[in-house]
């Protein structure tokens, strides 16, 4: 066999091995999604998605307050966590080659490894006990702390992938460094930054432990930022603990609803940012 044929064989072998590993990695995900769809699809209907939970032990009711609470929590978490995470990542990538930057990077990595339940307990001690009330604000604050290191790290790594020649070309035109960073470098790395944000949203949308310590859960719809609130992860957890068949079915339905919500947000954000990124590149 010639050297060329051997190289082609090795190349195809590597491709097939890579494809096989990717397929094996997809098996757990596909299996979980199959179980969720199979067991939860029968529970999804308008009444289930919009009504409040029923009386324990009696069939009926829905997950309306949990859906409302999840959307509100994720929205507040995005408002709190995304700007700070992106700006932190920008600083570490563009201006963080100094002792302060190294300390921030170390603390960010430590925070990323913190168990979410510990963050929930800390917020419970500092916020819930201080104000003597479970609240949406406390839950959003806990989730934003979980989100922060993910966005910071992904933003930093995405900006580091932008070639220095792009920065040099921009500043050679007389553009200030801060404007080059925000208008040129960040735009070029937008795809990676958005991916990091979506990963963070998917992470916090499914968190249960910190919410148990911060928003507690509720049978009712939203009544104020300083009041307890339900959320899909808490509702799924509590339904799974009940011994009734209807509760198990509702738990699967709530799990499917949460999965679909995260999927819709991911697809929607990607489509929106893809269109803007294409427009920006076309103008350039």
Image (cartoon, rainbow, N blue to C red):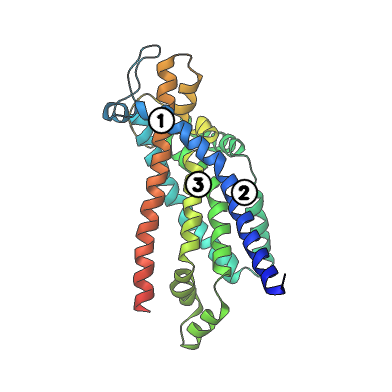
Disc 1: CA contacts within 10 A as few (<14), some (14-19) or many (>=20): many
Quarter occupied by the N terminus: bottom right
Tell me residue 114's x, y (percent): 64, 43
* In the image, residue 13 above or below residue 230: below
Label 3, secondary structure: give it: helix
* In the image, residue 41 above or below residue 261: above
Disc 3: CA contacts within 10 A as few (<14), some (14-19) or many (>=20): many
Mark 2 or 3: in front is 2
* In the image, residue 178 above or below residue 225: below
Q: Residue at x 40, y 17 (%)?
A: 246
- Residues at marks 1 and 2, CA–CA distance in whole angstroms: 28 Å
How many circles with numbers are drawn on the protein?
3
- Residues at marks 2 and 3, CA–CA distance in whole angstroms: 12 Å
Is 92 or 2 nearer to us in this picture?
2
Let me know if residue 211 appears in the view: yes
Q: Which residue is mark 2?
A: 112
Residue 144 image label:
3
Residue 254 image label:
1
Cβ atoms under marks 3 and 1 closer than 8 Å: no
């Amino acid at each position: 066999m010639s050297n060329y044929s051997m190289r082609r064989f090795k190349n195809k072998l590597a491709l097939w091995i890579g494809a096989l590993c990717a397929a094996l990695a997809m098996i757990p995900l596909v299996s979980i999604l199959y179980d969720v769809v199979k067991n939860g699809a029968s529970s999804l209907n308008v009444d289930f998605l919009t009504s409040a939970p029923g009386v324990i032990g009696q069939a009926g009711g829905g997950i309306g307050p949990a859906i409302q609470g999840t959307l509100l929590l994720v929205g507040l978490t995005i408002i709190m966590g995304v700007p700070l995470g992106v700006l932190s990542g920008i600083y570490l990538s563009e201006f963080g080659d100094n002792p302060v930057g190294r300390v921030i990077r170390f603390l960010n990595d430590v925070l990323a490894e913190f168990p979410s339940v510990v963050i929930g307990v800390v917020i419970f001690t500092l916020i819930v006990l201080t104000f003597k009330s479970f609240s949406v604000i406390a839950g959003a604050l806990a989730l934003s702390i979980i989100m922060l290191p993910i966005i910071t790290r992904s933003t930093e790594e995405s900006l580091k992938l932008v070639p220095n020649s792009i920065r040099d070309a921009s500043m050679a035109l007389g553009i200030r460094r801060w404007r080059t960073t925000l208008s040129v470098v960040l735009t070029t790395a937008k795809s990676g930054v958005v991916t990091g944000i979506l990963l963070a949203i998917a992470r916090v949308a499914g968190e249960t432990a910190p919410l148990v310590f911060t928003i507690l859960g509720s049978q009712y719809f939203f009544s104020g930022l300083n009041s307890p609130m339900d959320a899909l992860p808490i509702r799924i957890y509590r339904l799974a603990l009940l011994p009734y068949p209807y509760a198990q079915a509702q738990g699967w339905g709530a799990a499917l609803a949460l999965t679909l919500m995260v999927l819709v947000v991911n697809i929607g954000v990607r489509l929106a940012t893809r269109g803007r990124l294409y427009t920006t590149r076309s103008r350039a």
